[in-house]
Image (tube, rainbow, N blue to C red):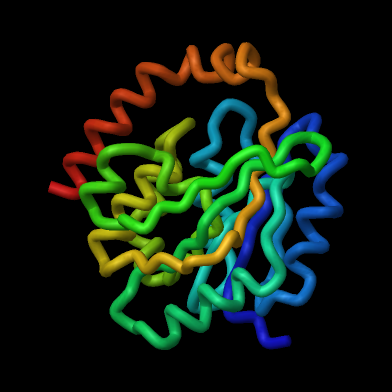
Amino acid sequence: MVSRCDVHILISPGRQQWLSQCLASLDREPAMIRIRRGTPGHIGIGRASAYAEGSAPFVARVDDDDYIEPGALATCVALLDANPNASAATTDLAIVDRSERITGHTRIRDRSVAAIARSPATVHHLTVYRRAAVEPWLDEIAAWPYWDDWILAAGVATWGPVLSVPMMGYYWRRHRTRAETMALFQPQRESYRAAARRVREILR
């Protein structure tokens, strides 16, 4: 299959048990898969470096503990081919636990700049970006240890509209307890506020 999309997976410590499922979900997609080790404590550096690799017209990422619905990435690519003015295409999301049980869904139909500015919740889905819309933002996202995906989503939205694909395309594994999640977020609070300000600046 011809690669139309460069997809990267950043490897994080302690999550190797799910990598094979992640890779299997991408097996029949029109994609070149690149596995890269992230920079501890600074997600943006790894993301920017990985997005810069390759030459396919589209780029995407999948976390090493998540997986996609078969055909979801191909559907996004086809939609972008049919809409050359669009900057990205993104699917709905299902939340799964350690036992593969679906515990929730996120369906976001509003991909407007206003919706992106309100919350980073719009970015943790399968999103296929047009490479030309991503490249101007690589230096900036490399400077963000957290919330780089939110910054990128805002930047890409200035290139052209973001299209919604009404299918459950991405499975986000929540394997941390609520207490673990809150402890992880605590050091990121100031970074979150700074990212929110920057997103509003970009989309102004």
**Residue 95, placed above or below residue 54:** above
Left or right, 193 with respect to 201, comes to right
**Residue 31: which quarter of the image?**
bottom right
Nearer the observer, 1 or 163: 163
| Residue at 83% over, 37% down | 99
Snapshot quadrant of residue 175? top right
Residue 54 at x, y percent in the picture:
59, 70
Residue at point 64%, 29% (across, down): 40
Specify the quadrant of the image occupied by residue 29.
bottom right
Does the image show residue 72? yes
Residue at 66% in and 74% down: 71
Q: Is residue 16 above or below residue 67?
A: above
Residue 37 seen? no
* Number of dots carrying numbers: 0
> Foreground: 141 or 192?
192
Residue 39 percent location from the top left of the image = 62, 35
Most distant residue in the left direction: 204
Residue 118 placed where, x, y %? Answer: 27, 38
Residue positioned 51% across, 73% down in the render: 76
